[in-house]
Amino acid sequence: MTDLPEDDRGVAPSIALYSILGFWFFYTVIVTLRAIVVGFDAQWEMAARRMVVAVIGIIVTWILYLALRRFDYKPLAVRFVAAFSLAAPFALAMAAANYYIFNVYDPISLFPDADMKKKAMEEGYVLISIVEDAMTRYFFLAAWAGLYLALSYASEAHRTERRAARLERAAQQAELRSLRYQVNPHFLFNTLNSLSTLVMRNKPDDAEQMIMSLSNFYRTSLTGDPLDDVPLEEEVHLQKLYLDIEAVRFPDRLTTAIDIPPALMNACVPGLILQPLVENAIKYGVSRTLSPVTITITAREDGDQLHIAVTDDGDNPPSGADAGSGIGLANVRDRLTARFGEQGRIAYGPREGDGFSVLLTLPIIRRGC
């Protein structure tokens, strides 16, 4: 397993530093207000030394942070014990530093009374003072350690969410690729069948024209990424190439009509999303009848939604097991769902009179394709 980058482990150093500065700023303000309320002498001298203690505290807490980082990604119980155990020696170090700053370094300015100065230097008094102060500072550092655990847990949860989002996006892309790649083999199979029919009927010119149209179709359709959307104008152009191929098979039966406002031609749609629909119209509407059939592709805008319809007026619409089964409509439905979620929908059914209609609904997107 690849290790995470150093700056992606646990709490980021910048966040830890801000939390440490915030804690010690809060400490300095509270202690200063307490000194003012109590009315201690030498307020300015004490404030200066208090600032020195705060700076030392920031450094000590930063070292505590570096120590706690070593327990990141350990079980929560281990991290909990480490946080509240390590706070003890660091609290003792802080108490010793505080005692030195206020009681050992130049104590005369704070303790003008010689007896107070002597008492401050007595060994028993020193130990008791340091231990008592260490207990107070332990709860202060333990509170910061608890905050660190909370920040660490939140950071870990955020990374898990990002990882899950990446996996979900990868799965969605894999699904879209799979569904998109299903279209080409299916279309090629149908076209080769048509080509075989022309050869068997001894129509070499028609077969040659179909091969050229097939070449143009694949040259155009295979140039883009399967995950990319394409302008509706390009998608319609591909369907015209396909219909040119089928027109070789059904020269007297197939008529096409395109009714799309120019303003919608730059709307983005999944590549080859109309291909299975046009194929179904050929399969059920044209090939099963001897009468002329018109396949119509229309589009209209409704608020922030785009409606695209593929209809035919053949007299043999798909029914029963044919309707909505196989790779055609199911492929389109799955691609719309994978790409747009609930915003991508498909509706289909027989038209009033003769024929079949399929309506796609998807959000209007006019950028990124």
Image: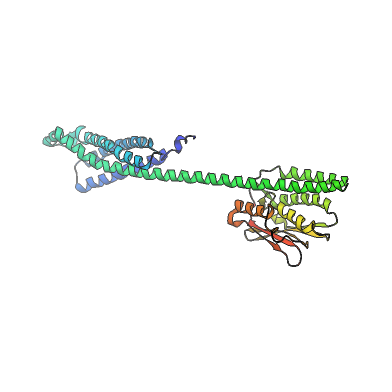
Q: Which residue occupies the extreme left position in the image?
A: 115
Q: Which is nearer the eye, 169 or 38?
A: 169
Relative horizontal placement of residue 170, taking residue 68 as reference (left or right): right
Residue at image coords 28%, 36% = 90
Residue 15 in the image, given as x and y percentages of width and height: 40, 41
- Toward which corner of the image does residue 8 lie, by quadrant? top left
When the figure is inspected, residue 30 is found, relative to residue 290, above or below; the finding is above
Q: Position of residue 164 (x, y in %)?
A: 51, 45
Q: In percent of the image, x 88 and y 47: which residue is there?
A: 203
x, y percent for residue 341: 58, 54
Which is nearer the eye, 130 or 197?
Answer: 197
Is 262 or 290 nearer to us in this picture?
290
Corner quadrant of residue 19:
top left
Give the answer, above or below, for where 293 lies relative to 339.
Answer: below
Please state which of residues 343 and 27 is positioned toward the viewer in this rendering: 343
Q: Is residue 54 visible?
A: no
The quadrant in which residue 105 appears is top left
Q: How is the image coloured?
A: rainbow
